[in-house]
Image (spheres, rainbow, N blue to C red):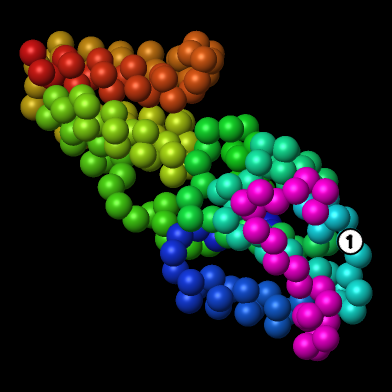
Amino acid sequence: MSMHYLFLGPDSALRDEKLNQLKANLFPTADAQQMDFERLDGHKLSSEALKVALTSVPALAVRRLVLISRAEKLSKENLLTIEKFLSDSPENPVLFLEASAWDMKSGSRKAIRARLQVIGGLEKEGRNVFDMMDLVCAGNTAEALMLLRELLGRGEEEERMLGAMVWSWSHKMRGRTSADRYKKGLLFLQEADHNLKRSRFPSREQALETAVVKLSSMLKV
C-alpha cells in the first residue's frame, strides 16, 4: 500500500484524523512537527517551491510530511513533477494531497492517483454506473451521457465501467426486449471493448459515449 495519500471530499474531520495519525507516526516531538511539516496551496503553486518541498531533507524527524491543499488546481507542470516524484518510489517526504475532486482527464492525474492511497468518500457518493444503465435502458440518452461524464470525471476507469455496463445490460434486458435487440446491444458493448483496447478514438471516454448513444437510441425506437 502506498505511503502517500490523496484525500477527496469535504469531510474535514476525517482529513484531520488521518493527518493527526500521520503526524503522530512521523514526528517524535512538537519541534520535529514544526520543522518537518510543510503545507502548500496547490492554487498558483510555483514549480520551484514544489521542487524544493519534494527534495528538502528532514531536520529533526526521519521523514518530512508535505500537505498540498487544493490539489485539484495544480498546474500541468506541477502534476508532471509529482508524477515523476512518485514514480521514483520515494520514502521522503510523505506526500498528502487534499482535493475537492480529482478528474482523470490527463495521463498525469491517472498516474498520480494510481500511486496514492485514496481517502475520503467523495467518489463513492451519488449515482453510479448502474444508475446510468437505468437511464440507457429507458432510452434517456442525454441524461445517461451527463452521468457518464460525471462518473468519468470522478475517476472511474473505462474498463471497469464497461464491465459493469455489460453485466447490467445482461441482467436488465435479457427477456425484456427482443432477442435481436438484446444481441445487438451486446455487440455494441463488444465494439466498445474493442475500441478501448485499440484506442480507436482520440479520447478513451468516446468509446463508452458511443456505446451509450447506440444502446439508448436503439431502445427509443
Quadrant showing the N terminus: bottom right
Instruction: State the residue position of label 1.
Output: 56
82 versus 98 height, above or below: above
Which residue appears at 26% of the width and 19% of the height? Answer: 213
Q: Is residue 79 a member of the stretch shown in magenta? A: no
Q: Position of residue 2 (x, y in %)?
A: 68, 57
Q: Is residue 111 visible?
A: no
Secondary structure of residue under mark 1:
loop
Q: In which quarter of the image is the C terminus?
A: top left
- The tally of labels here is 1
Quick one: label 1, few (<14), some, or many (20+) residues within 10 Å?
few
Q: Position of residue 12 (x, y in %)?
A: 48, 72
Residue 58 in the image: above or below residue 105: below
Residue 43: say if magenta. yes
Tell me which corner region of the image, top left, top right, bottom left or bottom right, holds residue 146. Answer: top left
* Quarter residue 152 falls in: top left
Residue drawn 76% across the image and 72% down it: 37
Query: In the displayed structure, does residue 87 sit left or right of residue 129?
Result: right
Provide the residue span drawn in magenta: 27-49
Q: In this view, does 139 lie above or below 113?
A: above
To which quarter of the image does residue 22 belong?
bottom right
Q: Residue 78, image x and y in percent? A: 72, 43
